[in-house]
Amino acid sequence: MRVGLDAIPLAAPRTGVGHYTFELARHLAFADPDSSFDLISPFPFDPSVFNHELPANLQTHQIKTNPLRRRWFAVGLPLHLRKSDFDLFHGTNYEVPLWNNRPRILTIHDLSILLYPETHEGRLVRRGRRRLPIMARMADRIITPTKAIKREVVQYLAINEAKVVVIPEAPRSSFSPMPRTEALATLEKLGIEQDFIFFAGTIEPRKNLVTLLSAFQEILRSTAHRPQLVISGKTGWLMDEFWKQLKAAGLEDRLRFTGYLVDEELRALYSTCRVFVFPSLYEGFGLPPLEAMACGAPVITSRTPALVETTGDAARHVAPLDVNDLAKNIVELLENESQRKYLSSAGLKHSARFSWDRTATATIEVYREAIVKRGERSRLTRAR
């Protein structure tokens, strides 16, 4: 096979979809050395992509565009694919070429843009509502990371469930428990105390940091605990309410914003936090809690379908908007070392069930099935 993959998520420092795209592409190449895989983008790649040694059968291509071809999925990408010998194209980030005579695989990570439009910028909501149903209908197969998202795709996009395949994601191999002495050096460099609660993720409304901050205020107000709250991730959008709440709370001395962290810095914080808290209102999979588990962190996350599916019995689950429940669970773990050790051990075992090798192998099966099905349809059409 020769497979093209949408590499637009690799044009910026990687977050969830970028990590998915990069790890999937690398492991596809490892899993099927007789095939070739091409990461295709109209934008320059983030330099960190090339910090890794890429397999010989994985290539990166920045495609030159003009004013017309900048309409990438409608014009630029279809024209590029038409003159190339790809057997299949995989849209890793909700979009596939609008016209193409080869199989198209589409990954839908979640439906937040349809189900939680208030957590996104208006222009993106309008675009997503217009384009996502079209993309879903055009795809030969749709991949979702959880059964929860498959159910939503079938229900809200009116897609036959036989067309949707569930393939879980996985923590990156860089995430494993870091020796404490090594991790403490990173904490010192970042100005983080040894007693801290940790959150990692893009700072945007869906992550529900307003509730986390309220729970943290309650802990400081009603208990003797004085941990730091450490928040890492790049700043996203629509967070005015959170910044106003933060300014009014006057907690600057107990809060630490690190900005975007590289994997080794994240690994140090995952490995040493007293508890990792991820109170997201909605996720398609939930990589940060799984990454934290892979480093031995005890995890508290939201009782929402995809997060419960991803973290299983290895995390504590709370109602995402219940400030008191979140504060209560954090305090219980701060005060109960045996519970922290139990969750740490359970999380390590649970996260080990996920691997990018298995994700890539399952994805290759979807590719091959789609190519065969497209060939069968073409033969039937010619026979008529």
Image: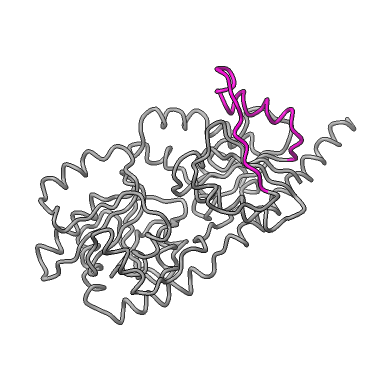
Can see residue 115?
yes
In the picture provided, is 222 more to the left or to the right than 335?
left
Number of numbered markers: 0
Q: Position of residue 372 (x, y in %)?
A: 79, 45
Instruction: Depth check: give the residue in front, 159 or 86.
Output: 86
Above or below 111: residue 279: below
> Which stretch appears magenta?
58-87
Whether residue 90 is visible here, answered yes or no, is no
Name the residue rendered at 75%, 40% in the picture. Answer: 87
- At 59% across and 48% down in the image, what residue appears? 143
Asked where in the image residue 324 lies, by quadrant, the reply is bottom left
Give me the residue at 53% from left, 41% from top. 93
Above or below, comparing residue 83 to residue 295 in the picture: above
Up/down of 133 relative to 193, above or below: above
Left or right for 330, reference 16:
left
Q: Is residue 208 left or right of residue 140?
A: left
Q: Let me know if residue 66 is in the magenta part.
A: yes
The image quadrant that residue 381 belongs to is: top right
The x and y percentages for residue 112 are 42, 42
